């Protein structure tokens, strides 16, 4: 199908990323803008802008009717949703298609199928993909939750059936905690996603978070290997790497093959990510969910494979069959991404919107900075705090860490606090350099508490380094 003009239904650094990919394909871009975003970098780079509402996202970027109307009135052929906002909203994807536009992403029914974690779990099991022991469907009643938890065995994780991003998640270590936390998790899920349905699964302690990048054309799929995202704070990713250094070649092959099986089973179209928990002690991996969109951390995969994922998404949406065979995709070196956010790590990560007075971007071989910033830009207080992603690529993980540390030393963002000092401290931490981390390691490190086992390291130096 023909696409000549893309409407970007997002903002920030991902909007800039999409504009650049579209321009390289010779496509016109129209940038959605809220009342707070008229001077953002994406608005400056796009061929045209289209207002979608007031500053608050609920009245602009999350307003489905306003976004679709703006896309149609701007003369676009297609809509790219980026990540966040409406990117995994099946109703929005359907409205885009009903308006005669191409949705650059999976089909609406695929988003519904894989966005419901209970349904996705059933599909994974049918594809022979290992899943964490848990409920087979959505649990609504507390009595049912008690019975299921007794069957699974404590501790159990309570998770929202719809949505993600760490919202609506609780860990119950016994029946008393379950009785208190189940209704709390249901309420949070209903408030965040409009659906209070939950499911339970076994809680695996000291686990690693591994995810596999896939591309599909609706019939055939390939993987672009995996990323590790174990350094997290409040279940939000902070530092991401590709590939996962903790996997053996045999584990990598099995993990990635399972992702392709599941993507092909559901007829996946576009770029998607299958997330897994990896138990390093046992060598087991378990599928937990699929993100039916481009990921924040996609650049590390691009760096180690040389494949432009956003451009591939657009070409697939144009109706092209998958342009890669699995044998064409080869790992090269190691890449690490540091998320630079408008937060003050010396003040419990307090949000820090403000005006960028000075910006100096690092360069050199193997360094990339995907950002929404320019000198003089005022970061608004209404949206996610992500300012940019600093990516370093080199021939090995150790070399990539050294390169990242060098690039962080060159990065200058003046006018507001950022999380760059956090990443500088992580880059020189012995446990991080050794890869001896898990999904709860960073929070313990930030608290300055001693870390047991091979992850033992010094107390967090963030306060000292962020002045």
Image (cartoon, rainbow, N blue to C red):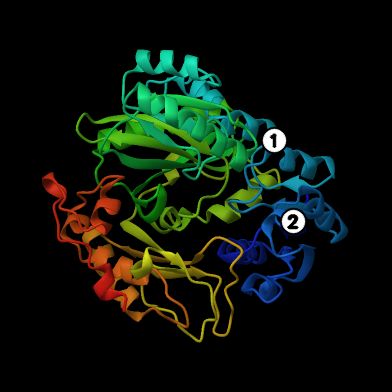
Q: Taking 382 as reference, is 270 above or below it? A: above
Inspect this view and state whether residue 366 appears.
Answer: no
Q: Which residue is mark 2?
A: 59
What is the tally of numbered marks visible in this picture?
A: 2
Q: Element under label 2?
A: helix
> Is label 1 or label 2 in front?
2
Cα distance in 3D space between marks 1 and 2: 23 Å
Residue 416: x and y in percent read 46, 78
- Which residue is at 31% across, 37% downward? 252
Q: Position of residue 82 (x, y in %)?
A: 61, 54
Q: Residue at x 34, y 58 (%)?
A: 335
Instruction: Identify which residue is drawn at 63% across, 47% down.
Output: 87
Q: Which residue is mark 1?
A: 108
- Residue 427 in percent (x, y) is at 25, 65
Residue toward you, 200 or 141? 141
Determine whether the residue tagged by mark 1 lies in a helix, strand or loop: helix
Considering depth in this image, is 350 or 339 the residue closer to the camera? 350
Mark 2 crowd level (few <14, some 14–19, many ≥20, 10 Å Cα): some
The residue positioned 26% from the left and 47% from the top of the image is 245
Q: Is residue 414 above or below residue 301?
A: below
Where is the C terminus found, in terms of image quarters? bottom left
Query: How far across and how far down the image is residue 139, in percent?
Result: 53, 20
Q: Nearer the viewer, residue 105 or 49?
A: 49
Instruction: Give the answer, above or below, for where 348 lies relative to 155.
Output: below
Q: Is residue 377 above or below residue 437?
A: below
Side of 124 relative to 18 (left or right): left
Horizontal placement of 335 versus 264: left or right? left
Badge number at residue 218 = none
> Within 10 Å of the Cα at label 1, are there few (<14), some (14-19), or many (20+) other Cα atoms?
some
């Amino acid at each position: 199908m023909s696409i000549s003009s893309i409407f970007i239904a997002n903002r920030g650094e991902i909007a800039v990323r999409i504009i650049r990919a579209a321009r390289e394909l010779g496509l016109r871009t129209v940038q959605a803008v809220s009342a707070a975003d008229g001077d953002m970098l994406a608005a400056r780079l796009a061929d045209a802008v289209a207002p979608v509402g007031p500053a608050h996202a609920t009245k602009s970027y999350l307003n489905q009717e306003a976004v679709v109307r703006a896309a149609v009135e701007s003369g676009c052929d297609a809509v790219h949703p980026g990540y966040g906002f409406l990117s995994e909203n099946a109703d929005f994807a359907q409205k885009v298609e009903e308006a005669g536009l191409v949705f650059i992403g999976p089909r609406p029914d695929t988003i519904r199928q894989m966005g419901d974690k209970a349904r996705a779990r059933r599909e994974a099991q049918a594809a022979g993909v290992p899943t964490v022991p848990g409920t087979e469907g959505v649990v609504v009643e507390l009595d049912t939750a008690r019975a299921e938890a007794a069957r699974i065995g404590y501790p159990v994780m309570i998770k929202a059936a719809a949505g993600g991003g760490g919202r609506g998640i609780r860990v119950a270590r016994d029946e008393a905690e379950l009785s208190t936390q189940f209704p709390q998790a249901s309420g949070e899920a209903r408030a965040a996603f409009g659906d209070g349905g939950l499911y339970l699964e076994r809680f695996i302690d000291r686990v690693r978070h591994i995810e596999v990048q896939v591309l599909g054309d609706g019939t055939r799929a390939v993987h672009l290997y995996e990323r590790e995202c174990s350094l997290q704070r409040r279940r939000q990713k902070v530092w991401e790497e590709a590939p996962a250094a903790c996997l053996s070649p045999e584990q990598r092959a099995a993990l990635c093959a399972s992702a392709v099986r599941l993507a092909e089973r559901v007829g996946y179209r576009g770029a998607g990510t299958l997330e897994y928990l990896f138990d390093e002690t046992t060598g087991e991996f378990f599928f937990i969910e699929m993100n039916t969109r481009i990921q924040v951390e996609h650049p590390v995969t691009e760096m180690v494979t040389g494949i432009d994922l956003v451009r591939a998404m657009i070409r697939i949406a144009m109706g092209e069959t998958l342009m890669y065979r699995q044998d064409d995709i080869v790992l090269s070196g190691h890449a690490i991404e540091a998320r630079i956010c408008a937060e003050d790590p010396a003040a419990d990560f307090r949000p820090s919107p403000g005006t960028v007075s000075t910006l100096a971007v690092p360069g050199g071989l193997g360094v990339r900075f995907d950002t929404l910033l320019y000198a003089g830009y005022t970061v608004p207080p209404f949206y996610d705090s992500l300012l940019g992603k600093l990516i370093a690529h080199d021939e090995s993980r150790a070399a990539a860490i050294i390169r990242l540390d060098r690039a962080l030393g060159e990065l200058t963002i003046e006018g507001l606090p950022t999380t760059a000092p956090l990443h500088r401290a992580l880059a020189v931490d012995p446990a991080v350099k050794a890869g001896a981390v898990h999904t709860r390691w960073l929070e313990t490190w930030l608290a300055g508490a001693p870390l047991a086992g091979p992850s033992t390291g010094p107390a967090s130096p963030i306060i000292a380094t962020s002045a």
